[in-house]
Image (cartoon, rainbow, N blue to C red):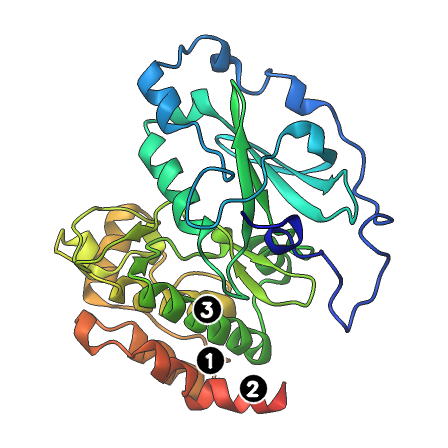
Amino acid sequence: MQSLAAALPKAAPAPAKKGPPPDELDIGTYDGSLDQDEDFPENNDIEISPDDERVLALDSSVCGPNPTRQWNLNDLEIGRPLGKGKFGRVYMARTQAPPKYIIALKCLYKSEIISNGVIKQARREIEIQQNLRHPNILRLYGFFHDQKRIYLMLEFAAEGEMYKQLTKQGSFSDRRSSRYIAQMADALRYLHSKKIIHRDIKPENLLIGLDGSLKIGDFGWSVHAPSQRRNTFCGTLDYLPPEMIEGKAYNEKVDHWAIGVLAYEFLCGRPPFEDKDEKATYKRIVRVRYQFPSHVSEEAKDLIGKLLVYNPDKRMSLSEVLEHPWILKWQRKN
């Protein structure tokens, strides 16, 4: 069994940003919302069947090749809310026992998962994420459940959501965008080496760590696909590649396309195929019709153009992304 220290590395600040130790860090005030069901009134009306309960009885002390210690809510000091989603809430939290690790506690209502028909998807997300170890992938340290909820003990991304920063700033510089794209390419190369296709890369699913590094934080649409050919239609409209829109079989190259869309959105502040309605957006994606604003550099245009290619087999590889002149130029400057 993994020790606590092995399962939960300290949330120590990066060298460039020193701060108080975890036991002195202000995690904010718990607002009591976990004990209230007002935002999820339907929770009281849904009966969880024995079969569903078995599927959602998720506990990292008995799951996977590297079981953790057994956890429950009494082991944690819950702090301020970090956000609210479709299936529950996320809180800043700290382990009660020394050395008092800082985490993000994601609380998911079982009834919400059941009523939305995503039982297998939720379990798959947890099973995938628990075994991933990469600096640009949000770490899942452990998980447990009670009668109503599933609790995920996640790495705390101190700088928050990528989408909020992009919305606030409008767009990112070449320096910042190239750094994020390099980190994304490296993380996806790691996932693909494990036969995992993400399928839903977008700013809303990305977080930023204390050292400013990108963190992939959502694996809801990810799939472990040893055959590497899939037919399921999923993901976010603006980031869908032509092969998914046309209902064709696809492979990990859908993630290569998504990196191209992401690079464009970082630099331009909007997705490349955005249009007045879904039908128009679909048409532009299938025809690969987009234009660059005048401020986008030729090197960035070249990288994006080699990723946003109709034929998946002709898209730039992730290794080529990491060796692209636009990436290397700004890596040297960084």
* Residue type, label 2: Gln
Q: Which residue is found at the position 52% from the left and 13% from the top?
A: 41
Residue 221 at what x, y percent from top left? Answer: 35, 47
What element does badge 1 sit on? loop
Whole-number angstrom distance, CA of label 2 to CA of label 3: 14 Å
Tell me: residue 90, above or below residue 191. above
Tell me: residue 140, above or below residue 299. above
Residue 279 at what x, y percent from top left? Answer: 24, 48
Circle 1 is placed at which residue position?
294
Q: Relative to the observer, which residue lies in front, 149 or 292?
A: 149
Instruction: Residue 331: give its label.
Output: 2
Whole-number angstrom distance, CA of label 1 to CA of label 2: 23 Å
Visible residue check, residue 122:
yes
Quadrant of the image containing the C terminus = bottom right
Camera-nearest label, 1 or 2? 2
Is there a contact, CB below 8 Å, between mark 1 and mark 3? no
What element does badge 3 sit on? helix
Visible residue check, residue 115:
no
Mark 1 / mark 3, whichever is N-terminal: 3
Indicate left or right for 158 with 270 as reference: right
Indicate left or right for 11 with 238 as reference: right
* Residue type, label 3: Met
Q: Which residue is found at the position 20% from the left and 53% from the top?
A: 245
Whole-number angstrom distance, CA of label 1 to CA of label 3: 25 Å
Q: Quadrant of residue 175?
A: bottom right
Instruction: Residue 184: give its label.
Output: 3
What element does badge 2 sit on? helix
